Image: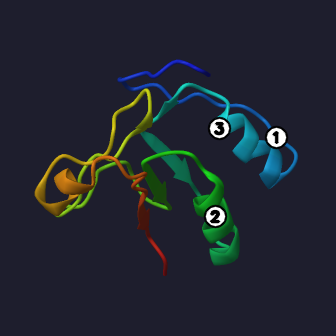
């Protein structure tokens, strides 16, 4: 659960509360991508503010938008490197992708 895996792998772990799930997700050295599936927009926004990842996908698969960029935190990178984001590489950028219907 604490390794950065690039491949068709889906780690699964149980939790009892949203706070516990966020603590478990943040308990690693890496922070490239996180995913969240919920029908509650308030839950999504709460988790989005607390997750320590450069990209968060909400209710969708993990492919950034064409205008998007990779924005890793911690050992997963130093932020986006294209466009104006290259100038802001020393900031903690957090991209959110939300599918809301």
Which quadrant of the figure has residue 21? top right
Q: Residues within 10 Å of mark 2 (few under 14, many from 20)?
A: few
Which residue is label 2 attached to?
38
Instruction: Name the residue: 70% across, 68% down.
Output: 43
Residue 67 makes an appearance in the image: yes
Q: CA distance from mark 2 to mark 1?
A: 15 Å
Q: CA distance from mark 1 to mark 3?
A: 11 Å
Instruction: Name the residue: 59% across, 21% down.
Output: 2
Q: Say if 54 sits above or below 5 in the image.
A: below
Secondary element type, mark 2: loop
Which residue is label 1 attached to?
15
Which quadrant of the figure has residue 5? top left
Q: Say if 46 sits above or below 89 in the image.
A: below
Secondary element type, mark 1: loop
The disc label shown at residue 25, or none: 3
Secondary element type, mark 3: helix
What colour scheme has been applied to the protein in the rendered image? rainbow
Quarter that holds the N terminus:
top right
Residue lying furthest top: 3
| Label whose residue precedes the other's in the sequence (2 or 3) | 3
Q: Is residue 5 left or right of residue 35?
A: left
Q: CA distance from mark 2 to mark 3?
A: 16 Å
Instruction: Name the residue: 39% across, 52% down.
Output: 61
User: In the image, residue 51 lies at what x, y percent?
Assistant: 60, 50
Quick check: marks 2 and 1 in contact, CB under 8 Å? no
Instruction: Name the residue: 88% across, 45% down.
Output: 16
């Amino acid at each position: 659960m604490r390794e950065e895996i690039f491949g068709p792998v889906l780690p699964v772990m149980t939790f009892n509360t949203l706070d516990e799930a966020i603590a478990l997700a943040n308990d690693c050295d890496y922070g490239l991508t996180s995913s969240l599936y919920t029908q509650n927009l308030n839950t999504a926004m709460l988790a989005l503010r607390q997750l320590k990842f450069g990209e968060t996908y909400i209710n969708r698969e993990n492919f950034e938008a064409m205008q998007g960029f990779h924005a890793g935190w911690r050992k997963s990178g130093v932020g986006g490197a294209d466009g104006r984001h290259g100038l802001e590489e020393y900031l903690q950028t957090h991209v959110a992708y939300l599918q809301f219907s």
